[in-house]
């Protein structure tokens, strides 16, 4: 079965698509001129670029017609969209061609694009049970967030030495500022690995394997990776995320003992140093690690593939 994947903008939308795509023998990607244009081909997938915009209707219309041509030529059995504005023209084109569409939502509070487009989807695969109420009745299927296989092979140890700091695939100025000031603390300097946006890391599994504590934003894909490994974290939600969904994500982890929540407005070098000092001991880190592991859904990508194969395609490989 050939599958078209559409995603765009940030790693939070792209990495789940890559994890699911690994489960299908025939697949290709449609995205925009952003991070997906690099990551999808690097992972060995055929990639088609189309225009996309959240504000320019001309780009959406142009993207729709290009997606229509690509889908008509490639003839996928289904389309799986994992978020980003580029998915709008792709899903509309897919529906016009009679293709079955599936969405995958990473956040506890779903994005507006997925909430709207869920009306056109056969099912929505959600990462958290609480997300189901934002979609039409009987549309949501709880699977957890798919995590890349290299991340799944990483295990946590409280004896690791590194404190990994990053702001997601697009970085974060407030975190960078606090960390740059904190680097004057010689006791922490040798232990901090700081991804500031100028040094994007493609091998996150290697960094995670050395890490005892993460300081990062609260994107759902990042949190799913932390849960899969059992990495303790200090979460600093991006304050301008749509509908403040990152704070919802972070509070969910904090309430379950897997993380410490720090609001962006409260972030300073001093407050961050204090938060690190309070949890930077083997006993606390181990307790937080165990709590994080309880939030991991195993085999999410396999569950999505199994559900699709079981319900979407008949024996002749035709859409029901």
Image (tube, rainbow, N blue to C red):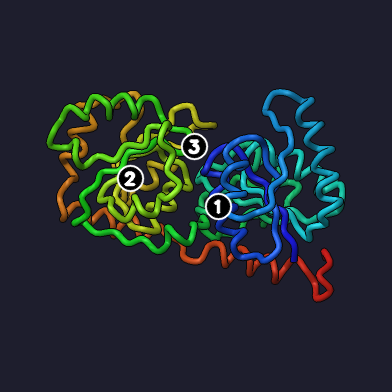
Q: How many marks?
A: 3
Give coordinates of residue 304: x percent, y percent. Answer: 61, 63
Is residue 184 visible in this depiction of the protein? Answer: yes
Give coordinates of residue 52: x percent, y percent. Answer: 70, 32
Quick one: SS at disc 3? helix
Q: Residue furthest bottom?
A: 315
Along the horizontal axis of the image, is 25 left or right of 236? right
Give coordinates of residue 236: x percent, y percent. Answer: 36, 34
Quick one: SS at disc 2? helix
Q: Which mark is residue 254?
A: 2
Towards the viewer: 184 or 216: 184
The residue tagged 3 is 245
Quick one: SS at disc 1? helix
- The image quadrant where one finds the N terminus is bottom right
Q: CA distance from mark 1 to mark 3?
A: 18 Å
Q: CA distance from mark 1 to mark 2?
A: 23 Å
Along the horizontal axis of the image, is 146 left or right of 173? right
**Image position of 8 with respect to 21: above or below:** above
Q: Which mark is residue 16?
A: 1
Q: Residue at x 57, y 39 (%)?
A: 35
Choose mark 1 or mark 2, whichever is in front: 1
Categorize mark 1 by other alpha carbons within 10 Å: few (<14), some (14-19), many (20+). Answer: many
Is residue 136 visible in this depiction of the protein? Answer: no
**Image position of 8 with respect to 300: above or below:** above
Give coordinates of residue 201: x percent, y percent. Answer: 42, 43
Q: Residue at x 31, y 44 (%)?
A: 214
């Amino acid at each position: 079965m050939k599958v078209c994947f559409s995603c765009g903008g940030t790693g939070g939308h792209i990495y789940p698509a890559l994890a699911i795509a690994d489960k299908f023998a025939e697949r290709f990607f449609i995205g925009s001129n952003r991070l997906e244009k690099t990551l999808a081909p690097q992972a060995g997938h055929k990639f088609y670029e189309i225009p996309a915009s959240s504000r320019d209707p001309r780009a959406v219309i142009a993207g729709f017609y290009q997606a229509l041509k690509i889908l008509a030529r490639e003839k996928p059995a289904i389309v799986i969209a994992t978020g980003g504005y580029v998915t709008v023209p792709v899903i509309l084109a897919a529906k016009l061609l009679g293709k079955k569409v599936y969405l995958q939502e990473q956040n506890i509070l779903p994005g507006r694009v997925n909430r709207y487009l869920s009306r056109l989807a056969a099912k929505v695969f959600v990462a958290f049970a609480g997300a189901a109420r934002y979609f039409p009745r009987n549309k949501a299927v709880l699977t957890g967030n798919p995590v890349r296989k290299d991340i799944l092979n990483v295990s946590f140890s409280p004896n690791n030495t590194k404190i990994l700091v990053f702001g997601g695939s697009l970085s974060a100025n407030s975190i960078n500022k606090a960390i740059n000031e904190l680097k004057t603390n010689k006791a922490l300097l040798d232990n901090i690995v700081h991804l500031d946006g100028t040094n994007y890391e493609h091998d996150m599994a290697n960094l995670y394997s050395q890490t005892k504590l993460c300081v990062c934003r609260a994107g759902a894909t990042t949190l799913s990776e932390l849960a899969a490994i059992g990495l303790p974290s200090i979460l600093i939600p991006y304050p301008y995320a749509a509908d403040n969904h990152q704070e919802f994500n972070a509070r969910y982890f904090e309430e379950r003992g897997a993380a410490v929540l720090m609001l962006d407005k409260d972030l300073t070098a001093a407050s961050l140093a204090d938060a690190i000092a309070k949890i930077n001991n083997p006993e606390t880190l181990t307790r937080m690690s165990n709590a994080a592991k309880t939030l991991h859904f195993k085999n999410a990508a396999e569950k999505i593939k199994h559900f699709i194969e079981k319900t979407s395609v008949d024996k002749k490989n035709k859409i029901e």
